[in-house]
Amino acid sequence: MKRYVVIGNGTAAVGCIEGLRSLDRGGDVTVISEEKHPVYSRPLISYLLEGRTDTERMKYRADGFYEENGCRVAYGRRAVSIDAVSHTVTLDDGCAVPYDKLCVAAGSRPFVPPFEGLDSVRNKYTFMTLDDARTLESALNENARVLIVGAGLIGLKCAEGIRGRVGSVTVCDLADRVLSSILDADCAAVVQRHLEQNGITFLLGDTAQRFAENRAYMKNGGTVEFDLLVLAVGVRANAELVGRAGGGVDRGILVNEKMETTLPDIYAAGDCAQGYDAALGARRVLAILPNAYRQGHTAGANMAGGGRTLTDAIPMNSIGFFGLHMMTAGVYDGEMTEEKENGAIRRFFIKDGLLKGFILIGGTERAGIYTALIREKVPLASLDFDLTKKVASNLIFSQDIRRKKFGGVV
Amino acid sequence: MRGSDGMKRVYVNEEWCLGCHLCEYNCAFANSGLKDMVAALKDRRIFPRIHVEGDDRITFAVSCRHCRDPICVKSCIAGAIFQRDGVVRIDRAKCVGCLTCVLVCPYGALAPGEDGIMQKCELCLENACGAPACAAGCPNRAIVYEERGEAE
């Protein structure tokens, strides 16, 4: 009987468990869970603070998931080292856990730059885990002035989640626009305006340089007084375990399309892994939930002897703020074409006859048709793509392709 | 994937589609929980789980394909979409309306309900119909509910 060990207990870990159980019902599975909770939907922590979900509904899998999948979970335990030769994982309590196949699904952690004076700030928070959210929640009050450092997805979802529960929310970022990793300047301006209309204040192209208790001294010379400080500058992949064991690491743990690391019998998946991005044509960390699950599932199936590959992962995000929804996918490379209608912006990036990426602000209906064109590298010459720029439609496909799509087993 | 999985699905034949949108109304009614069609639909904007696409020449209905390897299930950030007995279902209480499933569904088959929370075709297995109302009510049999094995 194979011994499987999974380091981590998030989405990639669930993908791994379900992937390996799809092929092997019998093997022994041990999950090392630093968090003391069964798996939950991490991207929902801002919805939790906003009152749009609760911890019961945040369960990513039903009660009984681990039992049904024959998993032993070591809660509150951290893996401190991997010995790739003897095939053991050592935990922080000194326990050595042997494995035949190991999946590192250790996720990422908030990156906190070494700000001068940060130690003097009493009420400072990060926003990544359920415990982070609960700690922040316990400090919220209707008079609190909140400063969020970082106008990325985490910082802005946090801003949305707490806006109705605090006195003010100011977000600063060294970038000159919000969501700089997924939006271009024009689209970011639209989103920023919408956030401002909903009570968020921005200081962009500017960031905190040092702190003194409840005051931030900004790069551009100003100061910001705050009661609560949220640090959402960025995240770092938890890649060190594999790096120290001798495995290849760059921004994340390097994996091939089978999710194998450079070490034998060790796989990696999720936010800690650096796998192939089909839109970029190179390996990079794709820290998004769908990718975590799919990488985990691929890893798990291969750990159980399957021959799966994951070759079509692309960056993509679907996210809303105060009722304005946006979707992005792929890379913004090539010629841009744009459709604007009723306040919605739809930008498409086309290169070498392929759709490489898109940004949709509002007007997101059936966007998955576009995403599939990127993921599957469908030549646009085979379609009537112009037809679909105003609203995505299956009309772009030939009747033959539609007959397959809607007339066959998929 | 090839070969039969023994599951009945909804299939469309666009040559026979009249573009009448009756499937959308039958879907909305079937999932309304109401006994009276007029009370369920009259003067209301409907949010069906099947929709008719097309232009002035071609029309066809689109609904969940109940994929064997559904990317929506793998992508749902809330763990709200799941597959049971081949049917792709949603636990609406868990959904937060992030629309990631809309972003990943290659068929454009998913749309949120009136409340912004996702809903989807569950083949009417859980409502009073017991089998897809869209197919049962299609006047030209452009929509059928049957088991098809061989096609890709």
Image: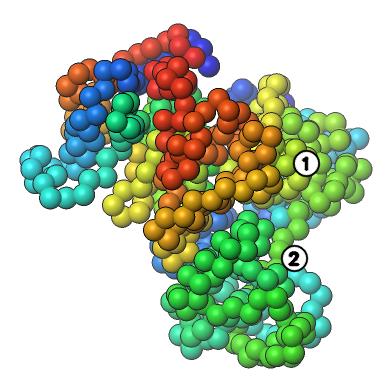
The answer to whether residue A378 is above or below residue B117 is: above
Circle 2 Cα neighbour tier, 10 Å, few/some/many (<14 / 14–19 / ≥20)? some
Where residue A95 sits: x, y (%)?
Answer: 79, 48
Which residue: 59% across, 87% down? A227
Where residue B14 sits: x, y (%)?
Answer: 32, 21
Instruction: Please identify the quarter of the rendering in which residue A344 is found.
Output: bottom left
What numbered label is drawn on residue B48? none
Q: Is residue A316 left or right of residue A299?
A: left
Which residue: 22% across, 33% down? B21
Residue that carries the numbered disc 2 in the rendered image: A111
Q: Is residue A205 left or right of residue A52?
A: right
Please identify the quadrant where the N terminus of chain A is shown.
Answer: top right
In this rendered view, identify the residue nearer to me: A276 or A355.
A355
Residue that carries the numbered disc 1 in the rendered image: A283
Amino acid type at mark 1 = Arg
Q: Earlier in the sequence, mark 1 or mark 2?
A: 2
Instruction: Please identify the quarter of the rendering in which residue A4 is found.
Output: top right
Where residue A290 sits: x, y (%)?
Answer: 58, 43
Circle 1 Cα neighbour tier, 10 Å, few/some/many (<14 / 14–19 / ≥20)? some
Secondary element at image label 1: strand
Residue depth check, mark 1 versus mark 2: number of the one nearer the observer? 1
